[in-house]
């Protein structure tokens, strides 16, 4: 009779031999360069032991990524590995949940972000972009690092929170800007990575201020939720309205605490990420004249009354935004998957409590998938289709970004709207490099542009 043998756990592959503190500092200060160095030395699987974190195995082998993404939430936990963001997102955030609660929360949150619902946000996105850029004059300098976050914040306030003007909207907007700025600065990023900086000594300490502002944001959101419930108004199309109506399998609605934590999660996960990608896209388009020429030829073929959804699906435009997310993916890694038991991935058996980390950036720079990977070449997305474990700017599997359809729509529409209403040039020919803003990677100089002329559509 055959007996089923338990797989024998193997030593962790390719331990990076630097001190944990040095690894952490490299990871915070220069993640892409560090990933390139490690991939060059150790190949597509290696282990970091960063100070304050567990054993992180970085994987960029497509087969390994495919096996990890095929998990339905039974072999790996994810939420409990995200503790550094718990004080910001709140205990009920989908990012921090595992198992049945994670499945339930995703089921309630997904519908507003998919299909016809997400498409209904297209006109709002174009209107916000036009409104933001309406007063720009030829010769004026703009900084994508300022403009893009203001567009993406407005998109979230209108499409997710359902707020357009009014006192509460104004208060919330200025609080959110200041709160996001605190966690996005280099000091703020350190607050996230070094737990001992997380000391609440009241409003005069950086961490105390972060927590106080979070509470003020929650109070405003609570008032909005109560008002919507009490008013018994016909529900709007925004995500909050849809979340208020959502029911789980037992017919239960989301609690107020869940609603607030999820709204803050959407904002934190969806605002800076999309803004950074837009700044990169504007940089590449204006840095590379041949890319700009091809893109403008495609956009010029559109009629003035073109449907925003037709614009959003233009092939070269889509290839430009995909290539933007490939070359410098805004999140360098997906959320680490923590093995709950011994687990075999791509033939290697890992012990429990290993943090298996899909290295998005390193997959995107595999020369066998993306030849001359450091070159911006949108055509690679027209020449072939990549599998979800080969092109993964939004992660994958049961943790795939909930807002990916909204983000893709926003990238294409903001870019197309700006380019069809104005013409720009880069203010300086400085080479832009990636720089950390909190947990995401943005541009080093914010991409200054000079408005050349108004196109006048
Ligand atoms: C260019 C823009 C964006 C990028 C690059 C991005 C990237 C990501 C990545 C890499 C993950 C982790 C996936 C994984 O571990 O497999 C993620 C998760 C998530 N994202 Fe995004 N994201 C973007 C925009 C958005 C937007 C607009 C929203 C919502 C408004 C959003 C909401 C979320 C949420 C809620 C999760 C957690 C999903 C879960 O744990 O189940 N993101 N995103």
Image: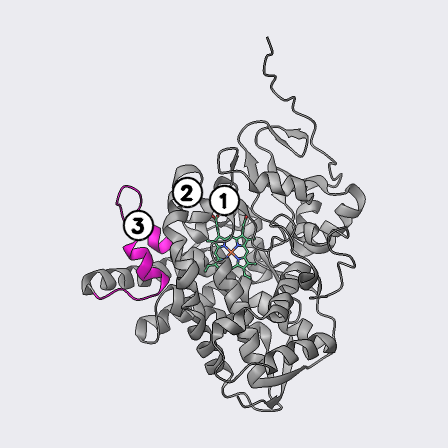
Q: Locate residue 445, reporting x and y percent.
A: 66, 71
N-term-proximal mark, 1 vs 2: 2
- Between 365 and 426, the residue placed more toward the observer is 365
Residue 103 is marked as 2
- The reply to whether callout 1 and callout 2 are in contact (CB within 8 Å) is yes
The residue segment tinted magenta is 233-261
Is residue 78 within the magenta segment?
no
Q: Is residue 66 left or right of residue 171?
A: right
Marks 3, 2: nearer the viewer: 2
Task: Give the quarter of the figure containing the N terminus.
Answer: top right
The residue to which callout 1 is attached is 398
Image location of residue 104, percent across then percent down: 37, 44
Give the side of residue 455 with respect to residue 15, left or right.
left
Residue depicted at x 67% and y 53%: 361
Q: Nearer the viewer, mark 1 or mark 3?
A: 1
Can you identify the residue that label 3 sits on? Answer: 254
Which comes before the other along the chain, label 3 or label 2? 2
Position of residue 424 relative to residue 168, above or below, is: below
- Mark 1–mark 3 contact, CB under 8 Å? no
Q: Please tell me which of labels 1 and 3 falls first in the chain.
A: 3
Spatial CA distance of label 3 from label 2 is 14 Å
State the CA–CA distance, disc 1 to disc 3.
20 Å
Badge number at residue 420: none
Q: Are marks 3 and 2 in contact (CB under 8 Å)?
A: no
Q: Position of residue 384 (x, y in %)?
A: 68, 58
Is ligand 1 less than 8 Å from the beta carbon at label 1? yes
Q: Secondary structure at mark 2?
A: helix
Rate crowding at label 2 as few (under 14), some (14 to 19) or many (20 or more) other CA atoms within 10 Å.
some
């Amino acid at each position: 009779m055959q007996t089923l043998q338990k797989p024998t756990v193997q030593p962790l592959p390719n331990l990076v031999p630097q001190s944990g503190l040095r690894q952490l500092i490299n990871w915070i200060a220069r993640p892409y360069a560090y990933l390139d160095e490690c991939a060059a030395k150790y190949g597509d699987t290696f282990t970091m032991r960063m100070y304050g974190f567990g054993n992180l195995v970085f994987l960029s082998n497509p087969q390994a990524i495919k096996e990890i993404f095929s998990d339905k939430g039974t072999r790996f936990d994810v939420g409990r590995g995200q503790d550094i963001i718990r004080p910001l997102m709140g205990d009920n955030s989908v990012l921090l949940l595992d198992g049945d609660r994670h499945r339930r929360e995703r089921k309630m949150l997904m519908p507003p972000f998919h299909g016809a619902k997400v498409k209904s946000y297209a006109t709002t996105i174009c209107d916000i972009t036009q409104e933001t850029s309406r007063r720009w004059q030829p010769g004026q300098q703009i900084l994508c690092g300022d403009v893009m976050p203001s567009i993406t914040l407005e998109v979230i306030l209108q499409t997710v929170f359902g707020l357009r003007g009014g006192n509460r909207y104004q208060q919330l907007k200025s609080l959110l800007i200041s709160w996001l700025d605190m966690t996005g600065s280099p000091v703020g990023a350190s607050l996230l990575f070094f737990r001992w900086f997380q000391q609440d000594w009241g409003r005069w300490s950086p961490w105390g201020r972060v927590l106080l502002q979070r509470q003020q944001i929650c109070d405003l959101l609570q008032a909005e939720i109560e008002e919507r419930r009490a008013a018994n108004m016909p529900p709007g199309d925004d995500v909050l309205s849809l979340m208020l109506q959502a029911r789980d399998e037992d017919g239960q609605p989301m609690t107020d605490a869940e609603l607030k934590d999820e709204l803050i999660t959407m904002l934190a996960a969806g605002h800076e990420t999309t803004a950074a990608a837009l700044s990169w896209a504007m940089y590449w388009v204006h840095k590379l004249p041949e890319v700009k020429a091809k893109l403008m030829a495609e956009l010029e073929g559109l009629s003035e009354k073109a449907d925003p959804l037709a614009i959003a699906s233009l092939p070269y435009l889509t290839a430009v935004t995909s290539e933007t997310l490939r070359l410098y993916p805004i999140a360098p890694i997906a959320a680490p998957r923590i093995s709950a038991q011994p687990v075999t991935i791509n033939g290697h058996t890992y012990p429990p409590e290993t943090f298996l980390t899909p290295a998005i950036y390193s997959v995107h720079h595999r020369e066998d998938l993306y030849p001359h990977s450091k070159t911006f070449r949108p055509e690679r997305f027209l020449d072939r289709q990549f599998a979800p474990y080969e092109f993964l700017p939004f992660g994958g599997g049961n943790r795939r970004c909930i807002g990916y359809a909204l983000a893709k729509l926003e990238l294409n529409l903001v870019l197309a709207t700006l380019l069809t209403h104005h013409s720009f040039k880069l203010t300086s020919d400085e080479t832009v490099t990636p720089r950390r803003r909190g947990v995401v990677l943005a541009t080093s100089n914010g991409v200054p542009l000079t408005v050349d002329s108004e196109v006048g559509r």
